[in-house]
Amino acid sequence: MASKKISAKTSKVADRIFEGTIDLHDETLASMVGWLGEEVVKSNACADMTIAAQSLIRSAIEKGKTDKEIQSILDIWKPGTKTYLGPADPVESVLKKFNTMTPEEQTAFQQELLKRLKAAKSA
């Protein structure tokens, strides 16, 4: 029997965290199939892979990938592997950072940006 630590919390109930264990019987595929049945193991694996694929899709969308590019990524994607999506869109990266700044930091950033734009125009 393989007991695994597990914890969970929810944003809907402040300061409430469950910490306990879950009995996975034995973490081998064969024992899980024997314990739960092939269909349950398969459906849970497919559900997990779907969630992983959706996460990959969200990351690709955030990096500015087109639907065609995302489909190409999914065509060669293998669950459990790291997928490189290339560098982030620089404009989106700057805007994302800008949105986390305080109003004072945003003002300073805008002034610096204008200063650099003016310098680039005069060069």
Image (cartoon, rainbow, N blue to C red):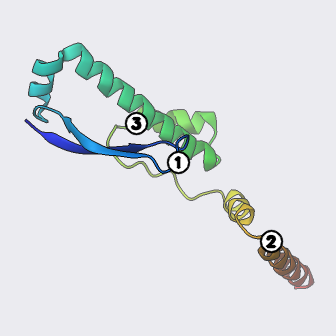
N-terminal of the two: label 3 or label 1?
Answer: 1
Distance between the alpha carbons at the discs numbered 2 and 3? 41 Å
Residue 33 place in picture, x, y as percent: 14, 21
Instruction: Give the foreground label among 1 and 2.
Output: 1
Give the distance between the C-alpha atoms of the residues marked 3 and 1, in whole angstroms: 41 Å
> Mark 1 Cα within 10 Å, few/some/many (few <14, many 20+)?
few
Give the amino acid at mark 2. Gln
For the residues labelled 2 and 3, say whether their Cβ atoms are less than 8 Å apart. Answer: no
**Measured from the top left, where is residue 34 in percent x and y?**
10, 19
> Which residue carries the number 3 mark?
76
Residue 54 lies, in percent from the top left, at 50, 34
As drawn, is 103 to the left or to the right of 70? Answer: right
Find numbered disc 2 in the image and state the secondary structure of the residue it sits on. Answer: helix
Q: Position of residue 5 (x, y in %)?
A: 23, 46
Q: Which mark is residue 14?
A: 1
Query: What residue would you read off at disc 2?
Result: 106
* Amino acid bearing label 1: Ala
Number of numbered tags placed on the structure image: 3
Image quadrant in which the C terminus is located: bottom right
The kind of residue tagged 3 is: Ile
Above or below 13: residue 115: below
Secondary structure beneath disc 3?
helix
* Residue in front for this viewpoint, 88 or 41: 41
Disc with the residue nearer the chain's start (2 vs 3): 3
